[in-house]
């Protein structure tokens, strides 16, 4: 029979292989058409991934406006549902949280990060979250305030040194040093003093976690072929810098060993201490999946200690530097903040915990900065089972993303969204606006666990700095 073909059998097989490879590359791309959900045209194998080159936030904003807030897109062959409708966000992240409990995870990030809050699932996530949450209670934050204030005073002293020399300086670098000092001291009892040692290994290692490039070959492979993550990990390739991860792992080990040599009750309760108190040695052994678990394991202590250390550095440092940037660009706003601080100090002797929480206009400036520059430009949940949410069918296993940046720049929700206008966050404005229009810390029970500490850091640092200085732009 093959002799009757107009082409040689080899060419027939080659053609068949080409067709099969093409079908493999495009097979999932009918997902959203079947669901009746619009989506930008995907490219074979890459999907819409290449469009991230202009910035994932800008890609989200364009699609949000074009497809009326709900649409699909593809990272490689993986379908993602983007939901920007505020009522749907409330349903998914709060009311239907039992069906959307978990976040997306990637194979190949290593055992340590597999056991962090960002990756843990279902009852394991709830168990570990309950051990960490007390760290950020009002009582604990009040205890931490003295250490945060000490770090803020160090930041002010550093600024004074820059003022004497009259040199330009990089605010992000100073902000990163400040936040590293805060999270190290309040979370782990470690005195880093990175304000005077900006190249401290903790700082350089933390920075390396955020050197993210969508066109890094490793990142491309994990997005296009997520099932290869585990294989790459076994070959020694991981999502994050192994050198940085090893450094933080050793830093946690050192902090834990220091606790063992100290008498009980000599140290204020911090994140690490609460994790250690919740340690259950039974979980360090092999535990059946269906067994009831209490406390946390050693690897969960390490994973969550590292993720808090790293995340507590970068996100708050960005917001601090960007708030000073906004104030420098808007001197009239900066003067209002300064007047508020001066008026407060006439009533109080110093800027302590109660004082920095009594600066509403400063808080409005921070909130507006977080609207314009949210630390996380989107966040996700995984649908556990086929679900109907207000008429929208979401199949089991679907990745559901919330486009924070696009929502924060929706002109219907935020008139003139490109402008810095702290007055958007007056008490009256907030009460008149849908609370799901503002999502800098996520939404629902799985929101950012450390947001209250981040806000305390920002208020202390900005109030202390603006008490002494004014920020101005430079040629750069």
Image (cartoon, helix red, strand yellow):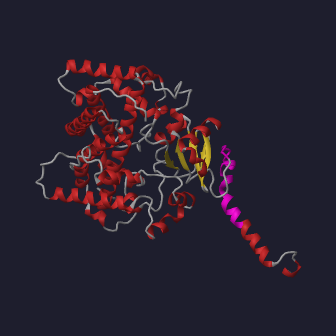
Q: Can you say whether 457 is above or below 253 in the image?
A: above
Q: Residue 264 in the image: x percent, y percent?
A: 12, 52
Quarter location, residue 11:
bottom right
Q: Is residue 387 visible?
A: no
Taking the spot 86% from the left edge, 81% from the top edge, the residue there is 3
Q: Main secondary structure of the magenta part?
A: helix
Image quadrant occupied by the N terminus: bottom right
Q: In this picture, which residue range is highlighted in magenta?
A: 20-40
Counting labels gives 0
Q: Residue 23 in the image: x percent, y percent?
A: 70, 62
Residue 33 lies within the magenta run: yes
Quarter location, residue 330:
top left
Taking the spot 53% from the left edge, 64% from the top edge, the residue there is 227
Pick the residue in front: 331 or 473.
473
Residue 363 lies within the magenta run: no
Q: Is residue 193 visible?
A: yes
Taking the spot 15% from the left edge, 48% from the top edge, the residue there is 267
Q: Can you say whether 409 is above or below 20 in the image?
A: above
Q: Residue 12 in the image: x percent, y percent?
A: 79, 74
- Residue 27 vs residue 240: left or right? right
Q: Can you say whether 84 is above or below 219 in the image?
A: above
- Residue 458 vs residue 62: left or right? left
Pick the residue in front: 403 or 85.
403
Q: Can you say whether 118 is above or below 249 in the image?
A: above
Quarter location, residue 248:
bottom left
Taking the spot 49% from the left edge, 28% from the top edge, the residue there is 434
Image quadrant occupied by the C terminus: top left
Q: Residue 145 in the image: x percent, y percent?
A: 22, 36
């Amino acid at each position: 029979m093959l002799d009757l073909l107009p082409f040689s059998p080899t060419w027939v097989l080659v053609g068949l292989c080409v067709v099969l490879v093409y079908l493999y590359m495009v097979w999932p791309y009918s997902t959203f058409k079947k669901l009746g959900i619009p989506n930008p045209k995907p490219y074979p194998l890459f999907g819409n991934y290449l469009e991230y080159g202009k910035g994932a936030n800008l890609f989200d904003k364009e699609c949000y406006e074009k497809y009326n807030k709900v649409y699909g897109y593809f990272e490689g062959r993986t379908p993602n549902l983007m939901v920007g409708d505020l009522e749907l966000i409330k349903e998914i992240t709060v009311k239907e949280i039992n069906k959307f409990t978990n976040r997306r995870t990637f194979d190949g990030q290593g055992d340590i990060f597999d056991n962090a809050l960002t990756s843990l699932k279902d009852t394991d996530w709830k168990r570990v979250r309950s051990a960490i949450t007390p760290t950020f209670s009002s009582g604990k934050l009040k205890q931490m305030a003295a250490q945060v204030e000490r770090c803020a005073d160090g930041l002010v002293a550093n600024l004074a040194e820059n003022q004497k020399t009259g040199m330009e300086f990089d605010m992000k670098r100073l902000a990163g040093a400040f936040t590293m000092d805060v999270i190290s001291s309040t979370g782990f009892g470690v005195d880093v003093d990175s304000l005077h040692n900006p190249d401290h290994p903790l700082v350089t290692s933390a920075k390396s976690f955020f050197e993210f490039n969508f066109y890094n070959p490793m990142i491309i492979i994990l997005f296009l072929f997520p099932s290869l993550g585990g294989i790459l990990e076994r070959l020694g390739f991981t999502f994050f810098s192994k050198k940085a991860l090893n450094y933080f792992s050793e830093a946690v080990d050192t902090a834990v060993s220091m606790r063992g040599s100290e008498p009980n009750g000599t140290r204020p309760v911090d994140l690490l201490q609460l994790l250690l108190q919740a340690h259950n040695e039974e979980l360090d052994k092999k535990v059946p999946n269906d067994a009831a678990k209490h406390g946390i394991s050693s690897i969960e202590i390490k994973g969550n200690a590292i993720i808090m250390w790293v995340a507590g550095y970068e996100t708050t440092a960005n917001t601090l530097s960007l708030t000073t940037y906004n104030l420098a660009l808007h001197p009239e706003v900066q003067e209002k903040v300064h007047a508020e601080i001066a008026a407060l100090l006439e009533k109080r002797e110093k800027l302590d915990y109660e004082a920095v929480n009594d600066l509403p206009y400063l808080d409005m400036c921070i909130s507006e900065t977080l609207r314009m520059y949210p630390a996380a430009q989107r966040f996700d949940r995984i649908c556990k089972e086929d679900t109907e949410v207000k008429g929208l069918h979401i199949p089991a296993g679907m990745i559901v993303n919330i486009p924070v940046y696009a929502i924060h720049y929706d002109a219907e929700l935020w008139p003139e969204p490109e402008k810095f206008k702290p007055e958007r966050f007056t008490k009256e404005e907030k009460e008149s606006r849908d609370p799901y229009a503002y999502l800098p810390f996520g939404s629902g029970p799985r929101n950012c666990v450390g947001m209250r500490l981040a806000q305390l850091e920002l208020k202390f640092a900005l109030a202390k700095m603006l008490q002494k200085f004014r920020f101005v732009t430079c040629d750069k």
